Amino acid sequence: MITKIVSKSQSTTWQAELSQAFTNPLELLDFLALSHMPLAQQVLQRPQFSLLVPRHYAAQMQPGNPADPLLRQVLPILAEQQQVPGFSHDPVGDQKAEKTTGLLHKYHGRGLLITTGACAIHCRYCFRQYYTYSRHIFTQLPKIIENLQADTSINEIILSGGDPLLLADARLAQLISQLAHIPHLQRLRIHSRLPVVLPSRITKDLIHHLTATRLQTVMVIHANHINELDATVQQALQQLQHSGVMLLNQSVLLRGVNDNVADLKALSEKLFSSHVLPYYLHCLDRVQGAAHFEVNEIEAIQLVKQLQEQLPGYLVPKLVREVAGMPYKQPL
Ligand code: SF4
């Protein structure tokens, strides 16, 4: 049964929800009844990459569990301050791939547009946490469009960020319309964590903007653990899929979050029952401050082998690593 899409009058709910997000680590610990646990002593209270956690996401965490896999993804801890050799501010070579401000060109046929520096959640392992976002990305848009018009080898445009679905509807609609006027573009790919962390963003109006275009729309969501996929998230995904948006998922393999076969298998199965195909399982991008999340490649390969023994092939995500300067993600 198709679930009713939220009405227009509710279309600003997500913005109100976002304004209520947790920004103080101690308040989040308090909410989870963890203030008096040893974990509280490890918390960074004013990290450079601030804490940001929507209440919907926090509500999926288990109160009293300091090892909660969702909490671990968002809580700034002292381990982030360790300087570990091999970990850098730009592990995937974004700065070098910038063709013009806001437009990255890494892979043949695809251009990636940095639409905003804002996210609805701050993931501690994020490879773009040190990226220098232009303050006024949209002032660069004419130049970006000019570049895309001139490069006929590009047939797919990726909206990334930050999170492109944090753009207001009108701005997103205007951007999609401008892109659709470039004749050689065929696909619009949107990388977003919002369907998972702020499902109220998936409104009827948003779906209209994503689908009322001649471009074929693909959305790559980002879920790392089955506990992120509650009924509300599943409804949002169902609405997208029923409206014709192709849904894929990419996860990051993270120590203490999803580094075991049972959790990875459960995630793949839940994704599929939510109309999403597991697409990539990324090895951690070696960004400074995230070394405590790393799972080594030998272990990662073993995990995926075990997944292959237990799941049909279409539910086993491709294990990859992004290597700066390489023309595609490297399969492991
Ligand atoms: S939502 Fe994506 S871009 Fe934003 S902090 Fe998380 S991983 Fe980084």
Image (cartoon, rainbow, N blue to C red):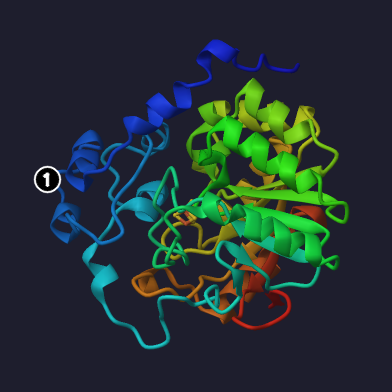
Q: 2 above or below 201?
A: above
Instruction: Tell whether circle 1 marks a residue whose Cβ is less than 8 angstroms from ligand 1.
Output: no
x, y (%) of residue 303? 61, 68
In terms of depth relative to the viewer, which is nearer, 40 or 325? Answer: 325
**Residue 309 shows in this picture:** no
Residue at (73, 72) in percent of width and height: 107
In terms of depth relative to the viewer, which is nearer, 76 or 38? Answer: 76
In terms of depth relative to the viewer, which is nearer, 298 or 152? Answer: 152
Residue at (26, 69) in percent of width and height: 79
Specify whether 106 is left or right of 122. right
Residue at (19, 39) in percent of width and height: 27
Residue at (54, 49) in percent of width and height: 138
Which residue was labeled with disc 1? Answer: 36
The number of discs equals: 1
Q: 2 above or below 314?
A: above
Looking at the rendered structure, the secondary structure element under dot 1 is loop
Instruction: Check the picture and name the quadrant holding the N terminus.
Output: top right
x, y (%) of residue 152? 85, 65
